Each structure stands twice: as structure tokens, then as C-alpha cells.
Amino acid sequence: MTENVDRETYSAARVRALESLLIEKEIITGETVDKVIEFFEKDMGPFNGARIVAKAWVDPAFKERLLADTPSAIAEMSFPRGMAGAEGENMMAVANTPEVHNLIVCTMCSCYPWPVLGLPPYWFKDPTFRARAIREPRKVLKEFGLDVAESVEVKVWDTSAQIRWFVLPERPEGTEDWTEEQLAAIVTPESMQGAAKVTVPAS
Amino acid sequence: MKLQHYIGGIEGLEPSSFEKKVFVQPWEERIFGIHVAMMALSNHLEAVKSVPTKFSSFWTWGHLRQGAEGMNPFDYFKYRYYEKWLGGISGFFVESGYVTEEELKSKTDAYLANLLAPLPSGGEPAIDDQVIEYLRLGDSPACDVEVQPKFKVGDVVTVKNPPPVDHCKLPGYLRTKKGVVDEVYEGAYNYYFPTGDGVGDPMPIYNVVFDSHDIWDSITEPNTKIYVQIFEGYLEDPA
């Protein structure tokens, strides 16, 4: 009966069949997958990275510590236990400045700093992005809506071993009197991978 | 060569899609959760020895990627990210004897008839506790081993060009290229298993910087540097 079924329906049924068999065979439980998903909705996601960025914007000494020793600086803040957990064992932050724009890519796979950014979005996993960003980053960024002048040095970081990078984006103008909480609310996951700048939403 | 190792730099592609979703179909998060559970219940983790799961295999990112790198390279580009995971992971469970293809097929047919049919419930809560604990603790490749790095910051190094293996940690575009050591990471790092091309045992890792023109000559952009962390096993002194 599978011949006439569309690709997504087939995959949906096949993964449900697999999960069902793994539960029956006592490999996982009826709740395992839900608990994993919940972990990334509540504990580990881009909302953590946004708080780190906002703190670095308002506290220059913290920013310095974050860039010098990222895990220790993160450990100063109150987060759920596990900020050095899976895919966060060796995280490092790099800062965008008026002279340098950083872009993170994983050309071989999809390495991503889970505790601060959660799970990688599709653009980051896309083989087309992985192929092109490493050779023509400005062109790709322009397609994403970000112009990086030739006078600005572009550093592309290809994650191929232990480090999981994230970008400390530049603080947008016009936010000088904002609170840390207000600032965290405008920091996007894309900006923390160097694929976008942080902007003040039009009110 | 293996095409999957040479994705960085491929020409002639369309504009990239800026799709910001993590999962583009609801079913994708289920296969993601299964893969996380497998990594969390892998037999190489000390904590798993007392966990009442029937999973008894060694399963890591390395195993998932070895599967993707082992695909027919033209097929690799036909499937979406989590479609490859579903194919690789269900194939692993069948090949390892946990489930049979017949069981999987008949269950799939049953869910095709009614996708909303419930999943089984129950199971040992200690399994879920380990899965979440794994996420909080991670599985660091840092090893408590003394190593003497061969290279120091500022050294010019050449990237080796070993024959292709089942799973490789060296981006293809770097092979034979010269770069400069920008950072020597403290300590030693192993990989989940020996890849057969020089990586696996604890060794130093370097951050090596390349001028994009040294890699792609005229078909790249000005004022662009590429930083890559490379295991010592992939580096040598320039000839």
C-alpha cells in the first residue's frame, strides 16, 4: 500500500512505527521522545543565548570574560543545569565588531551549540548553504538580507571538531536605555550564528 | 573521493533557503528524539550500565554520520536532513536485529491506515532519567591525557590528504592546503572511534586559519578568512 502514499505521510507512519516498536521492545519508553522535545522547548534553546548576549551588551567586564573563557562566563549566570551538556561541552563565543563579521557554518554536518541556541534550523543544515557559505559568504548573507561591505573582514568558522561556536552580535543603535530583558527579546538565533544582525523592530 | 566530504565550496548551486524552522514536518522531531535517546543509552557511557534499557549498542554522532557518508552520494542530495536520519536509524535497528523489516513494514502500514493511532505507553522511568541526564552532562571528547602538541601558534601547516574512509572529520576543500595555526586548544581530544585516517586516539586540536584565496583562488571573495579546528592527525609540516 506504500506505492500511492506521499513522501511525508510515509515518513510520518514509518517513524511512528519505529518509535512504537522501540517502546514495545523496552529500548525507550512511551515518554522518552516527548521528554527530549520538551527539554529543548523549556531548558535549552536560543532564549539562553539571547540572555547571554544581552548581558554582554550591558556589562563590558562580562563580555570580556565571555570571549576569553566562554564556559566559565556562562556558568556565572543562572541557567538550568546542563549548559556544558550535550553539544555544549566546548562552546566558544566570537564577537562581531564594525571591522569583523563572523559567520558559523558546519560544512560536513550540522554541529550547533545546543545549550545556548537549541537545535539547528533548516538553513544551517541545508547542503546548499554549507557548500556556498564557506566560499562566498557575502553573497549568501546578501541573499539572507545582510550586506557586509568588502572593507569588513569576514571570518567563516567551519565547525569540524570539538568547538561549538556562537556569535556575539553587535548591539543595535537606539537601545542605549534598554533593560537586559528588553535586549534579550530582540536577539535572534540567526544573529547568534552571524546570518543576520540584531535590529530594533519597528514599533 | 567521497562527495559527502567535499560539500564545502561546491559551485553551480541555487540561492540558499533561509528556512528558520528546526523541523519542517511534525514527524521529524520524533526521529530526532529517537537519535538523542540512542546516544544517551549508548553502551560506551558508564552511567548506562545500570539503566534498564534493552538497547545494548554503541551509538554516537559518529555512527549517524558514518551512515550519511556511506550513502550513495547522489541519493544523499535527494533526501531532506531528517529523511536521511530516518533511513539510517531504522536501517541500523533492522541490521542490528532489534526489529525486523517485516515488523517495521506491518506497523508502518497500520499507522498509514490511521496515523493518529496512539503509541504504546509505559516503560521504565530510569530510561528517561538517563536520556535527560545525558543531555545535561554531555559526552565530552576531552581526555585526561598528557600530549605534547607538534605545532605552535604561528606555524605554517599543510593539511594531509589521506584516502577516503567511512567517516571523516576533515573537510575535503582543505586537503593539501596550507594554513597558519591560530590557536592550540588546551588538552587532548579523542573521537568516538578510530576513523582509520588518523583520528580517534587522544591528540591535540588546532584552530587553523586559511586565506580563502589560498583555497579557491579567484572564485572567492576579498577580505575573507576561514577558521577550522583540525585534529593533529590531519596536519603535517609543509614540504
Image (cartoon, rainbow, N blue to C red):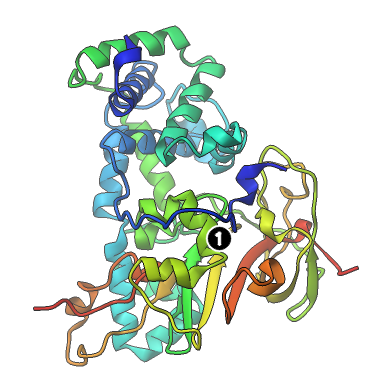
Q: Quarter-wise, where is residue B32 in the image?
A: top left
Q: Position of residue B220 (x, y in %)?
A: 60, 70
- Give the vertical position of A153 relative to B166 (above or below): below
**Which quadrant does the C terminus of chain B fall into?**
bottom right
The answer to whether residue B189 is visible is: no
* Of the pair A150 and B237, the residue shown nearer to us: A150
* Of the pair B168 and B161, the residue shown nearer to us: B161
Q: Is residue A80 left or right of residue A201?
A: right
Q: Is residue A14 left or right of residue B194?
A: left
- Give the vertical position of B20 relative to B24 (above or below): below
* Of the pair B51 and B103, the residue shown nearer to us: B103
Which residue does the numbered mark 1 point to in the structure image? A159
Q: Quarter-wise, where is residue A65 in the image?
A: bottom left
Residue shown at 46% from the left, 57% from the top:
A129
Q: Position of residue B133 (x, y in %)?
A: 39, 45
SS for callout 1:
loop
Residue shown at 28% from the left, 68% from the top:
A188
Can you name the residue that lies furthest to the right here? Answer: B239
Residue shown at 68% from the left, 53% from the top:
B172
Looking at the rendered structure, the number of numbered marks drawn on it comes to 1
**Which quadrant does the N terminus of chain B fall into?**
top right
The answer to whether residue B78 is visible is: yes
